[in-house]
Amino acid sequence: MVELLFALGVLVAIFVGFNIGGSSTGVAFGPAVGSNTLSKLSAAALMTIFALAGGLIVGPEVVESLGSDLVATQFSPLISIVVLFFIGVALFLSNVVGVPASTSMTAVGAIAGLGLARGTLNAALMLEIVSWWLVSPIIAFWVSGVIGRYFYPRLVEWFAVSQSEGALLDFDRSGAVPRPSLGENTTPREFVGTVVVIGIGCYMAFSAGASNVANAVAPLVGNGSLEMYPAILLGGGAIGLGAFTIARRTMDTVGNDLTDLPLVAAIVVAAVASTIVTFLSALGIPASFVIIATMSIVGLGWGRATRTTSLSDTVQGETPVASVGALTTDAEAADAPTVGGKKGTPKPAETEPIGEESREDIPSASDLFEPGTTARVIFLQNIVPSIATLAAYLVFRFLPIA
């Protein structure tokens, strides 16, 4: 029976990691794949490598928090299976409604439900985690808002490059070791822009591994079924399996999640969100990349929208305020084509000084915000973990699971 429960626990953990890999790969490498900078196969390989690296380097702190620190209850094999089951079901429900739920919040919720039912919840740690959940999206909003308000047009100028015909790099194979050089039509600007896009994707994959590997394997580590690093290898492998299989669809859906943004905006959101998530993971805090990234999108859109307001209006407190949501993908003056674009680099003169009267071609707030969509996304991102918490509490409170 013990061997059967162990095998079932491993299978459920693989299922959770598989779903994490499917959703996270599209978020991390959607911009690179969508602009034909990277193939789907290469994106899956990079996702596997860097998610595993994040899990091995930073992830143990999060595994420790979820597996032993959050609740004093000893994870038995059956308890581990039930907790992982709630996490997997929550992921499935979020996929059905088309809204990516936070696996970290769902995992914490399911484990917290166990702790509440058994009276073993570490209230101090739970308060610390929830506090960071409240603070980190606000930080993401304001950092991205400042970037959108003051630096976004300049970033567009820096990263607006057109893809040339032919290979990005040529290799001189006359010697024992092939020596790379820029392709015949590749400019240094194109090469740097391409490296940045791929590098940001790898950084996001590292961040996803640091935070999310624990969601798949922490209960198994908590009950002693697996040691820390073998468990992380299992979770990383499951994420890689999802990256090579179901993630192909998420990478195709460029209009969903963060890949709905223009490429430069996606880079900004990825850099801000990944940095915050990696920092929190190093502290042992299970962080919600989905919610942090959503608020980064919100802040970036708000910052860009305020550029349509004159300095006098801003001083008078008449800056347009709107609920925020997914940004549009229409061609906008502030979104010159980036890697994979066709229009080249905008001239520096095209960027108007911040705070001056707006140009007619700068997008309005109504073009940047979709309040209804955002309200639905944020509501479901919070309700799914709540359902997992309540369900876990009821099951562990009233059913004799040991």
Image: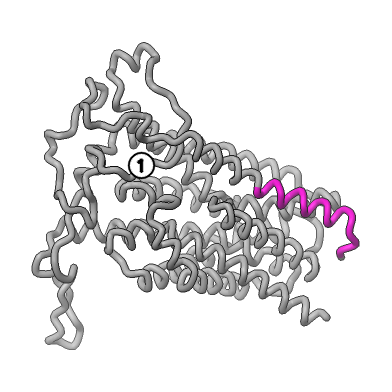
- Whether residue 284 is visible, yes or no, is no
- The span shown in magenta is 384-401
Front residue (pair 131, 32): 32
Front residue (pair 250, 300): 250
Q: Position of residue 351 (x, y in %)?
A: 18, 33
According to the image, label 1 marks what residue? Answer: 328
Q: Residue at x 23, y 57 (%)?
A: 340
Question: Which amino acid does the dot numbered 1 rest on?
Answer: Thr
Q: Position of residue 262 (x, y in %)?
A: 31, 47
Side of 372 relative to 9 (left or right): left
Q: Residue at x 45, y 61 (%)?
A: 250
Q: Residue furthest top?
A: 316
- Whether residue 94 is visible, yes or no, is yes
Does the segment drawn in magenta span residue 388?
yes
Quarter of the image containing the N terminus?
bottom right
Q: Residue at x 29, y 56 (%)?
A: 196
Quadrant of residue 128 within the rendered picture: top right
Does the segment drawn in magenta span residue 104?
no
Q: Position of residue 213 (x, y in %)?
A: 57, 64
Q: Position of residue 54 (x, y in %)?
A: 49, 63
Q: Secondary structure at mark 1?
A: loop
Q: Residue at x 77, y 80 (%)?
A: 4
Binning the other alpha carbons within 10 Å of mark 1 as few (below 14), some (14 to 19) or many (20 upward) gives: some
